[in-house]
Image: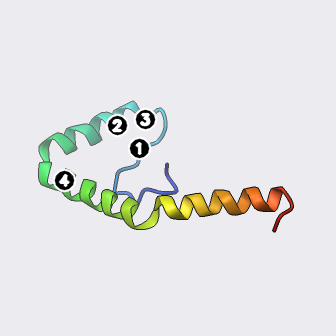
């Protein structure tokens, strides 16, 4: 999703339906293995740091409690 990916840092963004842009990005990726590896690692680290299961479960629990009128 475009609101989660920082273009060129932890992923790449291509406009929906932009077949040429996607093809160009894929070509660049196949010729830059180290760059791909770095972006992939940055993405993995961002997810590991910012999207923890405990936090998501707590958010769901709090939402359910507030909807049920318990809190």
Mark 3 and 2 residues: CB-CB less than 8 Å, in contact? yes
- Tell me whether circle 2 and circle 1 mark residues in contact (CB < 8 Å): yes
Q: Which mark is residue 70?
A: none
Whether 64 is drawn above or below 70: the answer is above
Residue count near mark 2 (Cα–Cα under 10 Å), binned few <14, some 14–19, many ≥20: some
Quarter residue 39 falls in? bottom left
Q: CA distance from mark 4 to mark 2?
A: 18 Å
Q: Which callout, 4 or 3, points at the residue further toward the start of the chain?
A: 3
Q: Which residue is mark 1?
A: 14
Q: Position of residue 34 (x, y in %)?
A: 13, 54
Q: Residues within 10 Å of mark 1 (few under 14, many from 20)?
A: some
At label 4, counting other C-alpha atoms closer than 10 Å, the crowd grade (few under 14, some 14-19, many 20 or more) is: few
Residue linked to disc 3? 18
In the rendered picture of this protein, how many numbered marks are placed on residues? 4
Q: Nearer the viewer, residue 5 or 26?
A: 5
Q: In this rendering, which labeled residue sits more in front, label 4 or label 2?
A: 4
Q: What element does badge 3 sit on?
A: loop
Q: In the rendered structure, are the residues bearing label 4 and label 2 in contact, judged by CB atoms less than 8 Å apart? A: no
Residue sitting at x 47%, y 32%: 17
Identify the residue under disc 2: 22
CA distance for labels 1 and 3: 7 Å
Q: Earlier in the sequence, mark 2 or mark 1?
A: 1
């Amino acid at each position: 999703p475009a609101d989660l990916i920082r273009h060129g840092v932890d992923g790449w963004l291509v406009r929906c339906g932009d077949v040429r842009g996607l093809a160009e990005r894929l070509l660049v990726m196949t010729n830059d293995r180290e760059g791909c590896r770095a972006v992939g690692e940055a993405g993995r680290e961002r997810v590991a740091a910012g999207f923890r299961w405990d936090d998501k479960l707590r958010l769901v629990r709090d939402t359910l409690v507030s909807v049920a009128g318990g809190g």
